[in-house]
Image (tube, rainbow, N blue to C red):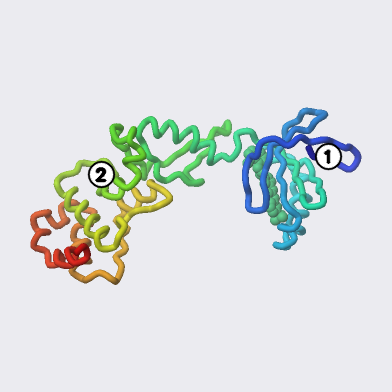
Amino acid sequence: RVNSSSNILAQKTINIGDPLGQGRFGRVFMAKEKSSGKIVALKVMFKNDLKEHKLEGQLKREIEIQCHLRHPNILRLYGYFHDKERVYLILEYAEKGELYKHLVKYALGYLNKKNVIHRDIKPENLLLTANGIVKISDFGWAVHVPSNKQNSRRMTFCGTLDYLAPEMVMMSSHDAKIDSWALGILCYEFLIGTPPFADMDSEVETCNRITKVDLKLPDNISLEAKDLIQSLLRYEPELRLPVEKIATHPTKVEIKRAYS
Ligand SMILES: Cn1ncc2ncnc(NCCc3cnc(NC(=O)Nc4cccc(C(F)(F)F)c4)s3)c21
């Protein structure tokens, strides 16, 4: 419970509810103004934090600017108050929260059911219709992940994705040269310790790196090994060294030594 003077004359009581978000300089809570029952968002910032980063002036400016703005597409700042340690912004409550998170939760859930990965969600690809409906657009980077793999999503996306060749990720036709690719991944991982296109944060990023063959070879492997890996990790399946030719490639010795 925070006794607040949300404007000069009236004394209002605000009950603080669930947290809505965590920013760099403070947290946002749902709050209810007691007498009117009005739901607002309350941004709470610590004075020390703002002082430390010399941001008091900037906050004053934000309050001055936003207090005078009245527009259906601009979040209202109703007012502010402070106590010994904190400054509170009383904000209009946007119940669907952050657009991006809302989209990911609803629209991507649908794409997931349809076994489609968009792979390029970004602000430019979020369009607005006349009545303010947000649309995810541009499926230029989308892939259709085979549904049998869908249920073992964790399985598909933790580790095993690293071995998928571009044509697999793009779900276009593929042939035995898939194995040449996978062997290239294996050689790389044997020598370097991790698969070449792994991206800890996002499977989608791994997909992108695979389809772009975003290969970075470290200097501490021999030219032969580099040659072998580069001749296997070719985007065009027909250009990859066929599996039978690998056996006679000079770098075999090095991999054996690496694992002896
Ligand atoms: C998450 N979420 N879900 C629903 C919902 N409904 C409303 N609001 C939400 N979130 C709060 C959005 C904000 C609006 N205005 C802000 N203003 C600010 O954060 N200002 C600010 C911060 C730090 C430092 C400075 C300074 F000092 F540098 F100026 C200024 S944050 C909601």
The percent coordinates of residue 245 (x first, y second) are: 9, 58
Label 2 environment density (alpha carbons within 10 Å; few <14, some 14–19, many ≥20)? many
Res 184 → quadrant: bottom left
SS class, disc 1? strand
The percent coordinates of residue 211 (x first, y second) are: 30, 51
Name the amino acid, label 1: Asn
Q: Quadrant of the N terminus?
A: top right
Q: Nearer the viewer, residue 132 or 154?
A: 154
Q: Is residue 136 left or right of residue 72?
A: left
Name which of mark 1 and mark 2 comes first in the sequence. 1
Name the amino acid, label 2: Met
Q: Is residue 51 left or right of residue 174?
A: right
Residue named by callout 2: 168
The residue positioned 25% from the left and 63% from the top of the image is 191
Res 128 → quadrant: top right
Res 15 → quadrant: top right
Find out whether the residues at labels 1 and 2 contact each other: C-beta distance under 8 Å: no
The residue positioned 69% from the left and 36% from the top of the image is 30
Label 1 environment density (alpha carbons within 10 Å; few <14, some 14–19, many ≥20)? few
